[in-house]
Image (cartoon, grey):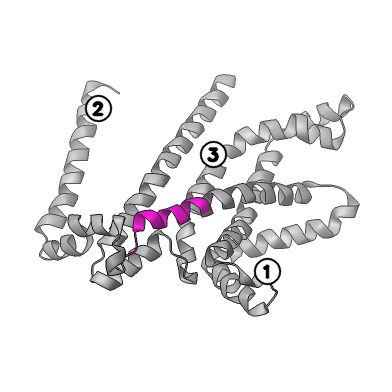
């Protein structure tokens, strides 16, 4: 990009940001919006909380989102790979499991995560199955996120494997490799490089969807912000929660963009 392009880019950015700022500052309801959503004192109070006033900390609530995301991500990677492996298998013995895996991906990619959250979070406790029915809302939330996102990730895995040229499979089998060895040594190493960017995009969505566990009563960042807003009649806590989620998701998004660009350059270099 030349000097003229840099100047034009900077100028357009300043104009757009200035227009957004002017709307919030000079609009007739601007002062009201700034007070109820962007009050610096109340934003800080929402972030740190105040137990004496019954105000929960949005910052501490984010810890729940973080451990839910981390645990769910690990489980999704494992379960999604297992489902994809079953769907890609050719063994007649696994035919019933292939049907079940196909039904699984169709159902949980079609039903909204929020509905699954209600069904699992409120349904399992009513079954009175002992240990299974006595878990915390956060645990049920992790289960729902794992169940739902495994269906998406399984399809990402499967698409990555199917994107490997068929000639690679034929060449591996021609030198005597078994189906399992071919998948492990030839197909999967190539597929992994292809699926990393879409996997990271799914995990960005997974990070945001940890907020849905608030409908079950778990105290995470969004729920803490809601309690704060209901107590002080101000929505600045929601702004704090939004900023915290942005601080988590934007670096992951930029890293995903970097990997996509790197993969594109690698493929172009190969041609």
Is residue 271 something one can see in this rendering? no
Is residue 95 something one can see in this rendering? yes
Q: Is residue 62 magenta?
A: yes
Observer-nearest residue: 145 or 6?
A: 145
Q: Is residue 58 magenta?
A: yes
Name the residue tied to disc 3: 197
Name the residue tied to disc 2: 5
Name the residue tied to disc 1: 131
In contact (CB < 8 Å): disc 1 and disc 2: no
Q: Is residue 54 left or right of residue 132?
A: left
Kindly report the secondary structure that dominates the magenta region of the rendered protein: helix
Q: Quadrant of the N terminus?
A: top left
Return the x and y of residue 212 as percentages of the image width and height. Answer: 47, 64
Q: Secondary structure at mark 3?
A: helix
Q: Nearer the viewer, mark 2 or mark 3?
A: 3
From what the image shows, is residue 158 above or below residue 262? below
Q: Quadrant of the C terminus?
A: top right
Q: Is residue 147 left or right of residue 180?
A: left
Q: Is residue 4 left or right of residue 64?
A: left
| Residue at the spot 39% in from the left edge and 59% down from the top edge | 221
Q: CA distance from mark 2 to mark 3?
A: 29 Å
In contact (CB < 8 Å): disc 1 and disc 3: no
Which residues lie in the magenta part?
Answer: 55-67
Q: Which of the two discs, 1 and 2, labels the residue nearer the N terminus?
A: 2
Observer-nearest residue: 222 or 59?
A: 59
| Residue at the spot 34% in from the left edge and 68% down from the top edge | 226
Q: Which of the two discs, 1 and 3, labels the residue nearer the N terminus?
A: 1
Q: Secondary structure at mark 1?
A: loop
Q: Which of the two discs, 2 and 3, labels the residue nearer the N terminus?
A: 2
Q: CA distance from mark 1 to mark 3?
A: 37 Å
């Amino acid at each position: 990009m030349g000097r003229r392009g840099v100047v034009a880019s900077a100028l357009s950015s300043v104009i757009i940001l200035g227009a957004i700022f002017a709307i919030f500052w000079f609009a007739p309801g601007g002062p009201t919006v700034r007070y109820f959503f962007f009050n610096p004192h109340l934003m800080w109070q929402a972030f740190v909380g105040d137990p004496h006033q019954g105000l929960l900390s949005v910052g501490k609530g984010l810890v729940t989102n973080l451990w839910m995301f981390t645990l769910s991500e690990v489980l999704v990677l494992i379960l999604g790979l297992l489902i994809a492996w079953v769907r890609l298998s050719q063994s007649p013995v696994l035919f019933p499991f292939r049907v079940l895996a196909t039904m699984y991906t169709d159902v949980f990619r079609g039903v909204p995560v929020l509905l699954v959250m209600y069904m699992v979070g409120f349904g399992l406790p009513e079954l009175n199955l002992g240990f299974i029915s006595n878990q915390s809302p956060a645990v049920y939330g992790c289960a729902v996120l794992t169940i739902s996102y495994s269906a998406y990730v399984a399809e990402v895995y499967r698409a990555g494997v199917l994107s490997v040229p068929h000639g690679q499979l034929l060449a591996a089998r021609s030198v005597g490799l078994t189906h399992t060895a071919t998948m492990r040594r030839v197909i999967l190493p190539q597929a992994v490089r292809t699926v990393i960017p879409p996997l990271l995009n799914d995990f960005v969505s997974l990070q945001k969807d940890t907020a849905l566990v608030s409908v079950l009563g778990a105290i995470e960042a969004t729920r803490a912000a809601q309690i704060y807003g209901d107590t002080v009649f101000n929505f600045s806590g929601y702004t704090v929660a939004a900023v915290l989620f942005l601080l988590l998701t934007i670096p992951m998004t930029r890293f995903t963009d970097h990997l996509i660009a790197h993969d594109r350059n690698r493929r172009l270099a190969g041609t």
